Image (tube, rainbow, N blue to C red):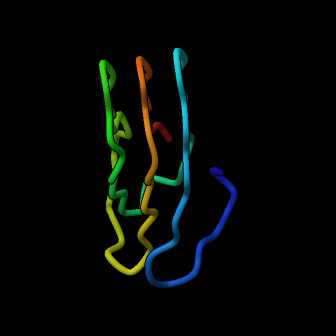
């Protein structure tokens, strides 16, 4: 999603991952909100040199079971 542009406001992304992992590559200037429910897993934002734009928000929602979600740029 590095070369993707999202509209101003909140853009939802639904995920459902079991016994695996997700690496999500996004631009450094997006604001990320993770609203996922997790069981034996987690979420981590590993973007560097980020200047988050409060007008462009990616809302990640869903379920992570025995899984992890990592956001990178």
Q: Residue at x 55, y 45 (%)?
A: 15
- Could you say which is closer to the camera, residue 6 or residue 27? 6
Q: Nearer the viewer, residue 7 or 38?
A: 38
Residue 23 in the image, given as x and y percentages of width and height: 54, 30
Residue at 44%, 54% in the rendered image: 60
Taking the image as shown, residue 54 lies to the left or right of residue 16, namely left
Say whether residue 61 is left or right of residue 24.
left
Q: Quadrant of residue 7?
A: bottom right
Residue 35 rendering spot, x and y as whole percentages: 33, 53
Above or below residue 17? Residue 63 is below
Q: Residue furthest right?
A: 3
Q: Residue at x 59, y 72 (%)?
A: 6
Residue at the spot x=49%, y=84% of the render? 8
Whether residue 15 is situated above or below residue 8 in the rendered picture:
above
The image shows residue 27, relative to residue 20, as above or below, that is below
Of the pair 65 and 29, the residue shown nearer to us:
65
The location of residue 31, given as percent across then percent down, is 36, 63
Q: Residue furthest bottom?
A: 8
């Amino acid at each position: 999603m590095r070369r993707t542009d999202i509209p101003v406001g909140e853009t939802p992304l639904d995920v459902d991952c079991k016994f695996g992992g997700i690496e999500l590559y996004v631009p450094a200037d997006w604001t990320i909100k993770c609203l996922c429910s997790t069981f034996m897993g987690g979420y981590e934002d590993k973007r560097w040199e980020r200047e988050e734009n409060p007008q462009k928000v990616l809302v990640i929602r869903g379920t992570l079971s025995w899984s992890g979600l990592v956001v990178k740029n």
